[in-house]
Amino acid sequence: MEILYDITAVCKELGTTSRSLRHWEEKGIVESTKSPFSNRRQYSEAQVENIKKVIFLRSIGIPITDIQKWQMSGEDIKVFIEERRSRLLSFIERKVQEYERLSDAYMSLCDGNDIFKVKESGVIPNAEQLRIAGECTVSIISGELAVCLSYFSQKMKDYMPLEVFRKVREDTLIPLGEYSGSYTLEADRKNANVVFARLNYEKLGLCIKYVFSGNKLHGLWFNYYGDNQTQIQEEL
């Protein structure tokens, strides 16, 4: 005969509340077994184990909607959490950029400037840097990283040798899905030595920031964007 545990005992053992268990059951991420003698919820061993997983995922910030998707997809939890982590990092970076723009506007107002007067940028795109950024982007897409590495400054080569570069690329591409076959290049409007490459993938977009010193790469950063820059919405 299967052992069933009363909802009160489960809440006490796992440090949760009956309200949370009922809410999660309404959302379909946990299940209970109704007692044949009352309307009280009871839980089997397997159901309790699932509740433990839900509690842990909620404790690291995974929204209920994402837990639903994971349970339905049957994906490896490592892949699922990595994708969530990447989306969250992209969200944080966008918020940091938003804060920096707000701070710039505030300081400009404090200096007595009119922030609504748009100034024309004096930055002229560097054709050679755009060409190199294009070669490096194709190199990163194809995995032929030696091409991109050949444009690294000595400092970059010391910081990111080929094997490290290959591992960073592999870890970066995991959450993206299939490559759509298209990318764009754009010179930064404020900094003459910065070029952005935007790559379209199935699940997320990838932005590569190239920072040049002359015609050598002095810095390279990967950043995600997804769902047309849709922000991550947290749920109870």
Image: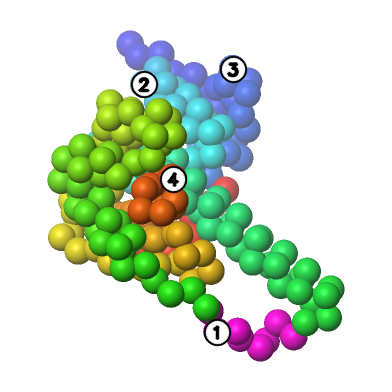
Q: What is the spatial separation of the Cα atoms under label 4 and label 1, in whole angstroms? A: 26 Å
Residue 88 percent across, percent down from the top left: 48, 47
Front residue of this view, candidates 200 and 125: 125
Residue 227 percent across, percent down from the top left: 36, 62
Label 1: few (<14), some (14–19) or many (≥20) C-alpha neighbours in 10 Å:
few
Q: Three-letter amino acid code at disc 2?
A: Ala
Query: Pointer 2: what residue?
Result: 46
- Picture mark count: 4
**Lower position in the chain sequence, tag 4 or tag 1:** 1
**Lower position in the chain sequence, tag 1 or tag 3:** 3
Point out the residue furthest to the top here: 1
Residue at image point 38% right, 60% down = 196
Q: Name the secondary structure under disc 4.
A: strand
Q: Main secondary structure of the magenta part?
A: loop
Q: Which mark is residue 219?
A: 4
Q: Three-letter amino acid code at disc 4?
A: Gly
Q: Is residue 203 left or right of residue 155?
A: left
Q: Which residues are magenta?
A: 114-121
Q: What is the spatial separation of the Cα atoms under label 3 and label 4, in whole angstroms? A: 51 Å
Residue at image point 25% right, 44% down = 148
Label 4: few (<14), some (14–19) or many (≥20) C-alpha neighbours in 10 Å:
some
Q: Name the secondary structure under disc 3.
A: helix
